[in-house]
């Protein structure tokens, strides 16, 4: 298990939904290590990696070392002019993700970006217009649900009615800071967007999905910098409370305070309360018991169950995304869902009280 969330790149079993060469993709903007998880998921689902481009040749060479099938493109424009490429995956600096995605979609390709997809409401509104005009997809890598087998299985249990109607979701998203290894943009709020906008986006997206909400309101949110005076624009803590349009509620907190002694980068957990049962997901570790993640605990009318799900469930999002791009359907994730999660994390960030100022 990775000690650093920035390099966390899950690998699953190959489960191709297309033949070799049927779905060519390209990778660009290698600013965040999540690009590797995004590419892994697409390749396992049958995508063919054709190109990679980044202004930094060292990043390109490192990427090709992992994915030797990729050819270094001389420019982003070279990728955008290749009519065979169906989708461009990118993990740009957060404040640059929207503009890059707009260029990709204007070229007639679908776009797959790391979270958070936007850092300002103006970016969101502009990209909505580009999506409407081009008909292309602006999909988001919400890895804490899409690339965690325990989280995938929780969704399946909920759809099967295992805990009734979901009425509350509580999320904990601690991360390890590793400040010395972080790029400069990580500490610049204009570039990373704030903690609720950034890693908080995972939590809000999960709430909308598990509680089946089309919309929600931010009841309360707060942020702070408790322990990083050398980086005054870093928010090392944030939390928020939401109410969904169906009455379900959420409480979540995110932070950069993973203890040095933890075996992985963060003890991410999700607690889901339904009218007929509860689910707890221990995503990356079962503290002091098992360093293997993807542990799920279900309690309902049938009793108590523990599931160890590593390498048992897979990651269906990526295959569904490829089929959606080819068939112009919305089974992996609707565009409205991706945009609503983005909008709410921006609102939570905007409304947040800074408790350490």
Image (tube, rainbow, N blue to C red):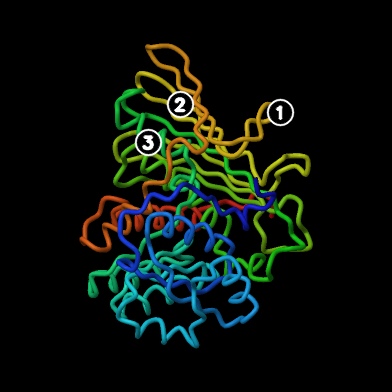
Sequence-first tag of 1 and 2: 2
Question: Residue shown at 29%/46% (left/top)?
Answer: 214
| Residue drawn at x 57%, y 83% as measured from the top left | 55
Q: Where residue 105 sits: x, y (%)?
A: 32, 75
Check the image and report above or below for 342 versus 25: above
Real-space CA distance between mark 3 and mark 1, rounded to the nearest whole angstrom: 26 Å
CA distance for labels 1 and 2: 20 Å
> In percent of the image, x 41 and y 59: which residue is there?
42
**To which quarter of the image does residue 157 belong?**
top left
Above or below residue 90? Residue 10 is above
**Residue 53 bears which disc, if any?**
none
Q: Which mark is residue 288?
A: 1
Q: Is residue 135 visible?
A: yes
Q: Can residue 115 be seen by looking at this rendering?
A: no
At label 2, counting other C-alpha atoms closer than 10 Å, the crowd grade (few under 14, some 14-19, many 20 or more) is: many
The numbered disc on residue 279 is 2
- Determine the secondary structure under disc 1: loop
Instruction: Say if mark 1 contacts mark 2, CB within 8 Å.
Output: no
Residue 240 coordinates in the image, percent (x, y)? 51, 44
Work out whether residue 36 or residue 243 is closer to the camera in this orientation and state it: 36
Disc 3 to disc 2, C-alpha distance: 10 Å
Asked if residue 351 lies left or right of residue 291, the reply is left
The first of marks 3 and 2 along the sequence is 3
Q: Which class describes the residues within 10 Å of circle 1: few (<14), some (14-19), or many (20+)?
A: few
Q: Nearer the viewer, residue 164 or 73?
A: 73
Q: Which mark is residue 155?
A: 3
């Amino acid at each position: 298990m990775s000690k650093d969330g920035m390099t966390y790149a899950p690998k699953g079993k190959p489960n191709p939904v297309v033949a070799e060469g049927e779905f060519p993709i390209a990778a660009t903007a290698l600013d965040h290590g999540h690009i590797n998880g995004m590419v892994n998921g697409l390749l396992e689902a049958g995508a063919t990696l054709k190109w990679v481009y980044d202004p930094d040749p060292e990043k390109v060479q490192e990427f090709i070392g992992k994915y030797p099938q990729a050819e270094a493109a001389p420019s982003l424009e070279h990728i955008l002019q290749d009519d065979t490429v169906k989708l461009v995956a990118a993990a740009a600096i957060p404040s640059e993700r929207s503009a890059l995605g707009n260029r990709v979609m204007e070229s007639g390709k679908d776009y797959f970006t790391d979270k958070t997809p936007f850092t300002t409401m103006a970016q969101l509104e502009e990209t909505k217009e580009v999506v409407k005009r081009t008909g292309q997809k602006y999909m988001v890598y919400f890895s804490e649900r899409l690339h965690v087998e325990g989280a995938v299985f929780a969704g399946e249990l909920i759809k099967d009615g295992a805990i009734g109607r979901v009425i509350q979701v509580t999320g904990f998203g601690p991360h390890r800071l590793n400040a010395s290894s972080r790029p400069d943009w990580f500490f610049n709020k204009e570039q990373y967007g704030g903690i609720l906008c950034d890693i908080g986006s995972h939590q809000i997206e999960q709430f909308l999905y598990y509680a089946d909400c089309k919309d929600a309101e931010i009841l309360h949110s707060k942020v702070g910098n408790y322990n990083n005076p050398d980086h005054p624009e870093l928010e090392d803590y944030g939390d928020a409370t939401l109410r969904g349009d169906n009455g379900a509620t959420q409480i979540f907190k995110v932070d950069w305070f993973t203890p040095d002694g933890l075996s992985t980068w963060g003890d991410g957990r999700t607690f889901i309360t339904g009218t007929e049962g509860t689910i707890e997901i221990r995503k990356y570790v079962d503290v002091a018991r098992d360093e293997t993640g993807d542990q799920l605990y279900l309690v309902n009318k049938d009793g108590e169950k523990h599931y160890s799900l590593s390498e048992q469930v897979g990651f269906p999002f990526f295959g569904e995304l490829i089929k959606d791009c080819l068939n112009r359907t919305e089974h992996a994730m609707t565009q409205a869902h991706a945009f609503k999660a983005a909008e709410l994390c921006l609102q939570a960030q905007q409304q947040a009280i800074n408790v350490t100022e």
